[in-house]
Image (spheres, rainbow, N blue to C red):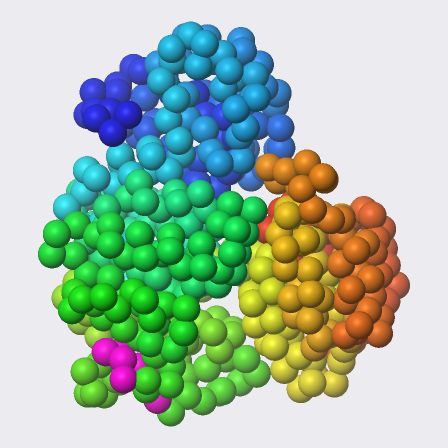
Amino acid sequence: MENLDLKNIKGKRFHFIGIGGISMSALAFMLKKEGAIISGSDLQENQEIKKLKGAGVAVYSFHSAKNVRGADAVIYSSAIHDDNEEFIFAKQNNIPLIKRAELLGIIANKYKTIISVAGSHGKTTTTAMLAEIFMQANLKPTFHIGGELVSTNSNYKIGNKKFFITESCEYKDNYLFIKPDIAVALNIDADHLDYFGSLEGVKKSFLKYAKNVRQGGIRIFSADDKNSKELAFDKNQATFSVKDNGADIYAKNIKEYKPCFYSFDVYFNKTKLGNIKLNIIGKHNISNALVATLISIICRIDFEVIKFSLEHFLGVKRRCEFVSNRGGAMIFHDYAHHPEQIEKMLDCGRELADKSGGRLIAVFEPHTYSRTKFLLNDFAKSFKNADEVIFAPVYSAREEKSAGVESDVLANETQKYVNNVKYILTYNKIFEHLLSEIKSDDVVMILGAGTIEHLADMFRK
């Protein structure tokens, strides 16, 4: 479907299987803006579905062949299997089936400059930072992000046809449908091993991604990440570093100006551009900010605009998001679902707890049985900084339980590193436990990429 003409879709009907996904819903809105008729189905009710229904989109809470009848094309994500009733009906009736990632590539290809941000960690925040900078520079970008910008309360925006900024996912090589002018690989880590099989498989995929840039394009990667070294295969590259590691852009004089908030000097081509004081927590965000700065410089945005944007950046929902203060305890929520991400979040939490004099309590909902199995010991070790860890059942997403292990196995493994570990079966019971457990000055980190946001929402009330 690479030749799908988005200029002539007015009045055509596109049906999305799994329309409530953060990317799927954004793509649905983008096609609706072009005049398409949108329908979709999803078994889970969430904020994205409420927004779609509010915009007049027909969303079904069940999968059925009836939902697809009359559709001109069907969009599906990697979470949808080929035994899905709607998928089967479309295939049997010769209704074009388009992968979510393929549609994203088709839409992106209509823009003059495509900026793609990939990486095992940090891509949502970095893409959001870029969107913020380009909006402040009045460049009217179109963007597509895997999380909601706090400043716009949305994960997408339709601008002019000059810049398309997108977060790009490596799972099942989905990012290869995009041919970017600027291709970012923030880092490379062992993840999605149910598909890639090993870290080497992940690295080979990122190499394909790096070679997929348009003619005259540039790829950006970390000079600090040992797994990214193979991306240095020609001169069409730029690098970033938080260690002054021979990179094109790097940070110096990194200072913590209040607990978990950092400032740093930015050097580009060995020349100091100025100082940036980040308004979101986490030392890891220095690296994300450097990438956003580098891309903005390449696109000729003045450093003062970059500085202003990053210093006023409010972050992304579910990315180290402060939820509430409950009885003097600080409650945070983060999308972290990989050991590397969890460790970074708990480093922040440990620092906050040490300075407040409280305890660090981590609540985690593992994302997929296979990831839990493949990275079992890495997950267990990632909680070593916590005083207490509570595990919710695995969020299965696209998988059957036979693909891996349940949270009780992870809880047992984590007891090698943390004394106080619990496995609690429901959000309500976790909430009740926390209410009886937390004390003033404690820090609670609610972590996971599934539906654990419902637990975070309980603390907002």
- Does residue 336 appear left or right of residue 422 in this picture? left
Q: Quadrant of residue 300?
A: bottom left
Residue 60: image x %, image y %? 56, 20
Magenta-drawn segment: 246-252
Residue 204: image x %, image y %? 38, 56
Residue 247 visible (yes or no): yes
Residue 251 painted magenta: yes
- Does residue 359 appear left or right of residue 182 in this picture? right
Decide: is 91 above or below 394. above
Decide: is 8 above or below 99. above
x 34%, y 34%: residue = 102
Q: Quadrant of residue 103?
A: top left
Residue 239: image x %, image y %? 27, 73
Q: Check the image and name the residue furthest to the bottom.
A: 253
Which of these two is toward me, 284 or 308? Answer: 284
x 56%, y 21%: residue = 84
Which of these two is toward me, 122 or 158? Answer: 122
